Image: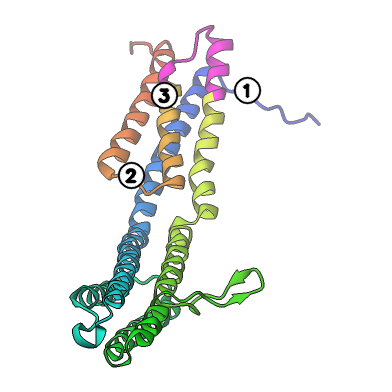
């Protein structure tokens, strides 16, 4: 009984297989790009809205600081019972309220975020009410209103307890909460590194192996140097894959032409060797 003998394919046949494999992997990368870019679009848009909300919260924090300075200036006059807290305080607190309302649209922390926004809005209302009563209470009332604006948070061992300080501290805690939520938005679902790296680097790794096999055949059987165009095609495909894993998906106007160029370069890289075995028909 004779054993099974494996036939080694002719180098030109192997090159045809390798060319088909490389072109197929470029096509797979293009298809993955289209799917992921489409599915991740909603997540990226939500993250942009969260960025806007974080900006509103930060601006609210700055305006709360201006409100505190306005109260301080009013207290220095010693005439709060006559002039009240002043227009600067009223304008600053109104802007804080406006920024908080705008931040609600981009909230990424779910019900917890909404609850904390409502809590901060309640703190703002309390600060305004205390400042208004300071007109009757005098300097002690102004001091209480300033404490409500800039009171230090409670401490739990070495760390502070979120949302236990004054309005400004609560705004900082709210901004931190939304920043963490935005981070989760950009690293979950179709933007998860645990999904993207295997999805895009897998085809690139296989393509690298095929390119190395092509170089071996060309160098040892044809006594030629491998075409640089094949390396450029690999680099172009890899650049799209790594970009998809590390940043927002590039525009289709950029990614698809790059991958099309990679496919064309790969096709042209094999052409000289395959053309050597084309004979005219008799």
| In this picture, residue 238 sits left or right of residue 142 | right
Q: Position of residue 194 (x, y in %)?
A: 55, 54
The residue under label 3 is 232
Q: Which residues are magenta?
A: 212-229
Tag 2 residue: 250
Viewer-proximal residue among 184 and 129? 129
Q: Which residue was labeled with disc 1? A: 8
Q: Main secondary structure of the magenta part?
A: helix
Query: Residue 93 sits in which quadrant?
Result: bottom left
- Is the residue 208 above or below the residue 78 in the image? above
- Disc 2 crowd, CA 10 A, few/some/many (<14, 14-19, 20+): some
- Mark pair 1, 3: CA separation: 29 Å
Q: Nearer the viewer, mark 3 or mark 2?
A: 2
Q: Is residue 259 above or below residue 48?
A: above
Quarter-of-image position of residue 84: bottom left
The dot on residue 139 is none
Q: Position of residue 60 (x, y in %)?
A: 31, 69
């Amino acid at each position: 009984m004779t054993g099974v003998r494996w036939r080694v394919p002719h180098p030109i046949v192997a090159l045809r297989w390798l060319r088909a494999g490389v072109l197929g992997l470029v096509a797979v990368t293009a298809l993955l790009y289209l799917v992921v870019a489409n599915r991740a679009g909603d997540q990226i848009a939500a993250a942009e809205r969260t960025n806007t909300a974080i900006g509103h919260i930060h601006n609210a924090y700055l305006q709360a600081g201006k409100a505190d300075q306005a109260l301080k200036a009013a207290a220095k006059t010693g005439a709060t019972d006559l002039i009240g807290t002043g227009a600067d305080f009223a304008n600053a607190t109104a802007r804080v309220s406006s920024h908080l309302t705008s931040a609600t649209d981009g909230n990424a922390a779910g019900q917890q975020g909404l609850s904390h926004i409502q809590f901060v809005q309640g703190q703002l209302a309390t600060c305004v009410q205390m400042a208004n009563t300071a007109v009757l209470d005098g300097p002690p009332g102004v001091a209480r209103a300033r404490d409500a604006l800039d009171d230090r948070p409670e401490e739990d061992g070495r760390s502070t307890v979120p949302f236990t300080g004054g309005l400004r501290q609560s705004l900082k805690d709210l901004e931190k909460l939304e920043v963490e939520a935005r981070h989760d938005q950009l690293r979950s679902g179709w933007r998860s590194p645990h999904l993207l790296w295997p999805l895009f680097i897998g085809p690139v790794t296989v393509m690298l192996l095929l390119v190395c096999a092509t170089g071996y055949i060309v160098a040892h059987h044809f006594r030629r140097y491998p075409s640089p165009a094949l390396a450029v095609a690999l680099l172009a495909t890899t650049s799209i894959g790594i970009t998809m894993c590390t940043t927002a998906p590039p525009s289709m106007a950029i990614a698809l032409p790059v991958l099309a160029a990679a496919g064309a370069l790969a096709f042209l890289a094999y052409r000289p060797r395959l053309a050597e075995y084309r004979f005219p028909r008799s």
